[in-house]
Image (cartoon, rainbow, N blue to C red):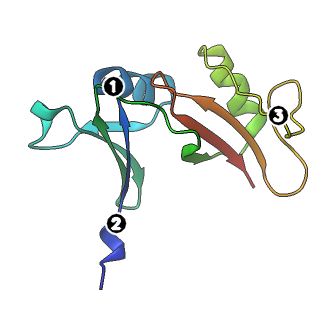
Amino acid sequence: MFDSTRAFGSFAVPDTEVALDFYRNTLGLDVVPVPGMEGYGLIRIELGADRSILVYPKPDHEPAVFTVLNLMVDDIDAAVDELGRRGVAMLRYEGFDQDEKGIARGEGPAVAWFTDPAGNVIGLIQE
């Protein structure tokens, strides 16, 4: 019924210019305006292999209370350290055993969380 090869996720931010700067310059991801939609402020985070996330402006945006994007990393300690140097602070969640860097280790993959400038939660995962 659906063409899952063309499915994509999306999330909102109040200001896509701020989001573009953060995702491109702070996180180092490939972020581009959506062709033909520049006037509406739509941007796309390119994830490779023809996969992307649509980010759209919503002036009355309220951040979700869950993770909207998970980024896989080879070395979570190095990623958390580098993000810290770039001014990004890791979140701490009650009920998770997180180390001094904010990394939850134990059963399953190592995970850390932070927010983008709009308050959306982003996860780092090392399997």
Residue 52 in percent (x, y) is at 37, 52
Give left or right: position of 110 versus 24: right
Instruction: Please tell me how crowded label 3 is: few (under 14), some (14-19), or many (20+) other residues with Cα within 10 Å.
Output: few
Furthest residue in direction bottom, as rendered = 1
Disc 3/disc 1 C-alpha distance (Å): 28 Å
Task: Tally the numbered discs.
Answer: 3
Q: Residue at x 30, y 68 (%)?
A: 6
- Disc 3 on helix, strand or loop? loop
Q: Position of residue 127 (x, y in %)?
A: 75, 55
Rendered image quadrant of residue 79: top right
Residue behind mark 2: 7
Q: Is residue 114 above or below residue 69?
A: above
In what element is the residue under mark 1? loop
Name the residue carrying label 1: 14
Element type at mark 2 = loop
Q: Which residue is mark 3?
A: 94
Q: Nearer the viewer, residue 106 or 12?
A: 12
Residue found at x 28% / y 25%: 59
Q: Which mark is residue 89?
A: none
Task: Choose between 94 and 15: the one closer to the eye.
Answer: 94
Which picture quadrant has residue 75? top right
Quadrant (top left/top right/bottom left/bottom right) for the N terminus? bottom left
- Return the x and y of residue 108 as percentages of the image width and height: 83, 58
Residue flagged by tag 3: what amino acid is it? Glu
**CA neighbours of label 1 inside 10 A, class few (<14), some (14 to 19), many (20+):** some
Sequence-wise first label, 1 or 2: 2
Q: Residues within 10 Å of mark 2 (few under 14, many from 20)?
A: few
Q: Are marks 1 and 2 in contact (CB under 8 Å)?
A: no
Q: Measure the C-alpha gap from mark 3 to mark 2.
A: 34 Å
